[in-house]
Image: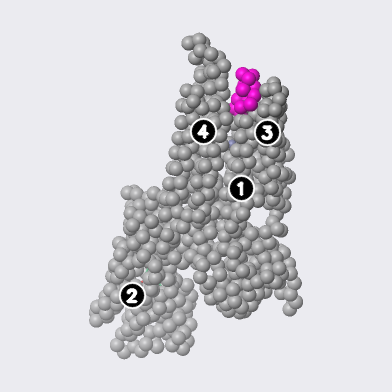
Amino acid sequence: MSDSVIQRREWTVSGMDCAACTAKVTKAVERLPGVSDVKVALISERLSLTLTDGGTEAQEIEAVVRRLGYGIAPKGQTVPGARKFVLPIEAPHDDRPVGEPAAAMTGGPAKDSAAPADRSLRWYQTGKGRLVILTGTLLVLAWAFELLTSSETGRWAFVLACVIGVAPIAKRAFEALRMGQPFTIESLMTIAAIGALFIGAAEEAALVVFLFAVGEVLEGVAAGKARDGIRALANLVPKTAIVEIDGQTREVPANSLAIGQVILVRPGDRVAADGEIVEGLGGIDESPVTGESVPVTKGPGEAVFAGSVNTEAALRIRVTREASDNTIARIIRLVEEAEDARAPTERFIDRFSRWYMPAIVAVAALVIIVPPLAFGAAWETWIYRGLALLLIGCPCALVISVPAAIASSLSAGAKRGLLMKGGAVIEAAASVTQVAFDKTGTLTHGRPVVTDLIPTSGIGEAELLQVAGAVESGSSHPLARAILARVDKAGIAPLPSQNARALVGKGVEATVAGVQAWVSSPAHAAEHGGIASDQTSVAARLESEGKTVVAVFRQDQPLGLIAMRDEPRADAAEAVRQLQALNVGSIMLTGDNPRTAEAIAGDLGMSFRAGMMPEDKLEAIRELGASGQVMMIGDGINDAPALKQAGIGVAMGSGTDVALETADAAILRDRVTDVPALIRLARATMGNIRQNVTIALGLKAVFLVTSVLGITGLWIAILADTGATVLVTLNALRLMRFRPDQEG
Ligand SMILES: Nc1ncnc2c1ncn2[C@@H]1O[C@H](COP(=O)(O)OP(=O)(O)OP(=O)(O)O)[C@@H](O)[C@H]1O
Ligand SMILES: [Zn+2]
């Protein structure tokens, strides 16, 4: 079918509690004709696949997933039977007193109006929850019977509890079997429970089924908790906005806002859309988006994010982005999709667990058969031990150890404005050995200011500025902006200019009043006949003060020098020190001249490479990458190629808006110390994963041995399995409280 249509489809799947579930769904869907590239994300509850037209119908895919016992609906629609456990979740940054009436007007964070798929069920309202209650009750009744009456009656109550409890599990096992998956935790459970009944261990069989059901509910709670961190972000954008139409105000749903509309945001309200202030001046708390807890004062012309809190004055804001495209929506999409970028460790564990379950089944079979046949041991004893082994065959704890830690880490990071695109990035960031910084806008504020004007003798300052301003008038380079600001301040009208052209890494040229003119670095000035010799030493002196000097030419006539200084960020030196403490080297890459670079890098305590053309930066990163893992930090606007080239490209600050989609990670605050924070979070995550793998494998190993030796029995085996899963998930959730900005 060469003309068949190929399309990517997405669904929301509910009820997946552990990674064994995702494996089950993946395998079942993968087998269907015309389906390829299946991705199932546990935390974001997403199934996406490529579907060839003429292959499987979408309804068929949904039917298969439903038969496995999960809820499914096309993305964006309500999942039937979806459930979400209610836990006392701290919605991050949502604890500030938002003006009551205002919140009521705008809908506020509006938790209760969340999408229907999120509608909460309490744990006991779910199928699995009811199963726990039912089997638990029967268990208690059976014990009561056993105590009060003959043990025979009690035994039947246990059998009943076991059969009722195991039925839904057996059904799921059977469905999976029909789809070609003989080894699932459900099939192991079913065999173990029924086997135990046959060897007369009804009491224990019932207990095992009950504990399994409890375990599933707990796993669901844990997975739900990991999800909530991400969901809380979505709840930060108000559901409605007050829009101004023809001088009238009207309340409309926030997702219906169109670009260009003007919305009214009163003090205490959350901003409903990404936009630009048209009127009003006040403190904006952007902590929900960037993690920056100190409100920033913003006024007309300045950009605000949806979800930030307007703390002081009434603002009129022009919408610049539709709801589906606002910064928070993009962050959420990024965090959700991050699950697809799996860490190498995770892929390894997945491969491992694919053979782990069959291997354990084989061992269990040997344990059952060999001792009685070879040594004439009692069948009953060894069947019992073999069944206990089956229960240890669930790789749940192991398989969930990585995604749980990564999901926690991603949402912990997102709360603080540290975004990483998935496990692969986290794993790489944990092993960073060298951080390369772009200078302007990253280590410095990116807002240079003119400090010195040195006209050539016979030229006035005004003339120097007039020509320089004319040449730079079309440029948005930070140096150009500095010069233009100075021209403006001096009240000089720049001359008319044409044909302005950037000389990348060198300067700009343009035709000013009919004559060719340049503004360029002194090094490049030689091409125009060079600057006066007495000015060469002045330039050198200014540069060694950390200033950037440019020379201005009209034709081949040097008009003079302009020096500018771009202040390093207050925390840049501290960041370099913290990186050093983490055993990570820092290097500054700049197109500026070596003397200026040395002055700035020296103050910050880092090494540098100067006079670099954009392609030199790529080469330098390649070179650094040969001897370690390099992280490149840039503003993401004009250094995208360098960010791509680095092992990990991190966009920092205001430019992140552009770079969210292209960089591997983004730092939303203008803080250099967030670079070490990012690395600390990544390292903590990998440490957490190592702990989890140790817990999971360690517990399995211990109980494998004790089960074979007959020291522990069936119910301990299942308790160990569930316990390990819950322990691992809880440990992963600790990362949510990790404070990456704290050292040590
Ligand atoms: N618009 C301009 N006006 C004046 N000089 C310029 C301009 N653009 C570039 N230059 C000169 O070229 C040098 C390198 O500029 P470039 O923009 O390549 O630096 P960069 O590597 O992006 O900056 P940084 O490393 O500081 O972030 C500047 O230091 C300056 O001397
Ligand atoms: Zn499981």
- Callout 3: few (<14), some (14-19), or many (20+) C-alpha neighbours within 10 Å? some
Quarter where residue 329 is shown: bottom right
The local secondary structure at tag 4 comes to helix
Pinpoint residue 389: horizontal percent, then vertical percent: 53, 26
Q: Is mark 2 within 8 Å of ligand 1?
A: no
Residue 5 visible at all: no
Element type at mark 1: helix
Residue at which label 1 appears? 224
Q: In the depicted view, which residue is nearer to us: 535 or 743? A: 743
Q: Earlier in the sequence, mark 1 or mark 2?
A: 1
Amino acid type shown at disc 2: Lys
Q: Earlier in the sequence, mark 3 or mark 2?
A: 3
Residue 196 on the magenta segment? yes
Residue type at mark 4? Ser
Q: Specify the quarter for ligand 2.
A: top right
Q: Which residues are magenta?
A: 188-204
Instruction: Give the residue number, with chain letter if any, for mark 4.
Output: 353
Identify the amino acid type marked 1.
Answer: Gly
Residue for badge 2 = 547
The mark closer to the camera, 1 or 3, is 3
Residue 344 in percent (x, y) is at 46, 42
- Give whichever of 378, 426 is nearer the camera: 378
Q: CA distance from mark 1 to mark 4?
A: 23 Å
Q: Amino acid at mark 3?
A: Val
Q: Which mark is residue 140?
A: 3
